[in-house]
Amino acid sequence: MADDEDTTGFAKLKGSKQTKRAPRYFDESSVKASTSDKHETNKPLERKSEDKKKKSGKKRASAPDSDHVDRKRGKETWDSDEEKDPFPGEAPIKEEALARYTRGEGNKIKIRAKTAGPKLERKTMEKKFHLAAQQAARAELLLGEDHGYLEASDDEDTSQLSQTDIADAVDISAAQKHFDLKLDKFGPYRMNYTRNGRFLVIAGRRGHVAALDWMSKKLLCEINVMEGVHDVKWLHVETMFAVAQQRWTYIYDHQGVELHCLKKFNNVLKMEFLPYHFLLATASSTGFLQYLDVSLGKELAAFNVKQGCLNVMTQNPQNAVVHLGHANGTVTLWSPNVKEPLAKLLSHVTAVRSIAVDKTGTYMATSGQDRYMKVFDIRALKPLQVYRMSAGAGQLAFSQTGLVAAALGNVVEVYKDCCSNVAEKPYLTHRLRNNITGLQFCPYEDVLGVGHQDGFTSLLIPGAGEANFDAFENNPYQTKKQRRDYEVKMLLEKIQPEMIGLDPGGVGQVSQLTAQEVEKREQEAIQKKFEPAKKKKGRSKSLKTVQRTKGVEEEWRRMKVRQKMREEEEKRKKQQKDHKKKDKWGSALDRFQKKEN
């Protein structure tokens, strides 16, 4: 027993890697026998390896030590032939997933250019679009959830299902999102959700304003402004909201404390907040469209639309263009940079009652008093679908997944796939007691908020909300510190209002025209614009016409030269003024000069 303990202890001290135990008695014969057995067992392996070498035709390197590491690949590999990958190349992408993110076929219009630069730019842009679509399709594996819709059997119809049926079928947490606030003393009510879908603010026509966390039913503030309220909107964070009251527009915090009174923004009926530009757009009963820069607290622009009372308004979330509906059936698109509308289209024969734009900025739905709902393609400004309704829709709203909600009196109808295809019947319907005055889908939730005469109602609409949210963009579960950091980040990444336009992607493009071509275009524009009036008694002959045209061109050049001389004179006077100040007061660095004796 002692001998056994000594041998095992010796093996432990030496750190031997042998799997077999050492023999009890060591002699030369046993050692020779063990080594001969090893050599005999290794011979057939060496023969097999030599046969493989002959077949492959490659020289095999000597076997490395066990600690050999391939530093380039960061893995422990032998210098032997590597095994072939059974699935070479990138993983395949399903065509259905790729079709959801593609932007259609490439541009086939021929470019007539002297250089190959524009053609290469188009090819690179198309490659980027294709690569972005592939990456988005592959990233679907990381999305944990997917939005689903109601599916009915052959003999059933989803529009026949009531809210109680849906609430009974879903889990408890989802069923709690269907509730009704009975506030029949201060209605009708307008409402608005925050961008992350966490908070809700409601405002009654008779002055009642309340903000709450509608998921936990926690009340933030509740006040009565003691005058009529037309509209209410959250600002960039859930700590401030704007209220369009009977006379002026006010800004309150989440505790109900008045922060600002905007007396320039009077008689406001509708409001829209542009989050990436920090602009609050208002439409008044006097026909004025005004923009307020919330980060600076200054009025940015004010336009007289000259179309009467402005009570129909919405924004395009893709390019921040404001859409206005008018009593003559037209819809105008506005930007704070231009005093005239960017585009104007005749949507209805009668007055426009409501407008809604989807989150991609592609489709616009309008409703009029003629009982029609039309879906337009904003890129081409042409109607895609026309629906005959039982009554004129007073409110319209788009969800994140493309559902359209229409308020027909006291009935809410939700349509599915009604933009690209023809919807024969509504997806869901719900009837209320009184007329509806406000509609909005809650972001990232299958919920539709409805404001009416008796208060507020939250409806369950399966498949309405986006299932996966970006926590860096909109986080419903953000903390106070995260909200503060997010607010600072938004201010640093604020987009200037000069970039608002129908084509936001055209701002980053660089003009490839030379100075001579630009001057030539200006001269051609002047010649086309100026047409000499016809005169009698031989004063409209060709020579006289050419002389008058040249005179106008010469006068334009003189005005340009005078303007340039005026700018140079102002610059020279400013330099002289700066020199006089410097001579009088001296420079701040004069204290370090050596004093003369």
Image: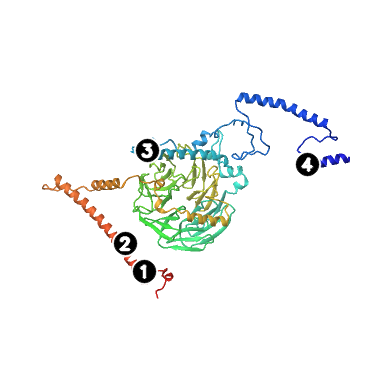
- Furthest-left residue in this view: 537
Q: How is the image coloured?
A: rainbow
- In the rendered image, which quarter is residue 147 located in? top right
45 sits to left or right of 353: right
Q: Which residue position holds label 3?
A: 116
* In the rendered image, the vertical position of residue 260 relative to residue 371, given as above or below: below
Query: Of label 3 and label 2, which has the lower sequence position?
Result: 3
Which of disc 1 and disc 2 is earlier in sequence?
2
Q: How many marks?
A: 4
Query: Mark 2 — residue?
Result: 571
Q: Nearer the viewer, mark 2 or mark 1?
A: 1
Front of the two marks 4 and 3: 4
Dot 3: element: loop
* Amino acid, disc 3: Ala
Structural crowding at the residue carrying mark 3, measured as other residues with C-alpha within 10 Å and reported as few (<14), some (14–19) or many (≥20): few
The residue that mark 4 highlights is 14
Q: Name the amino acid, label 4.
A: Lys
To which quarter of the image does residue 142 belong?
Answer: top right
Tell me which label, 4 or 2, sits earlier in the chain: 4
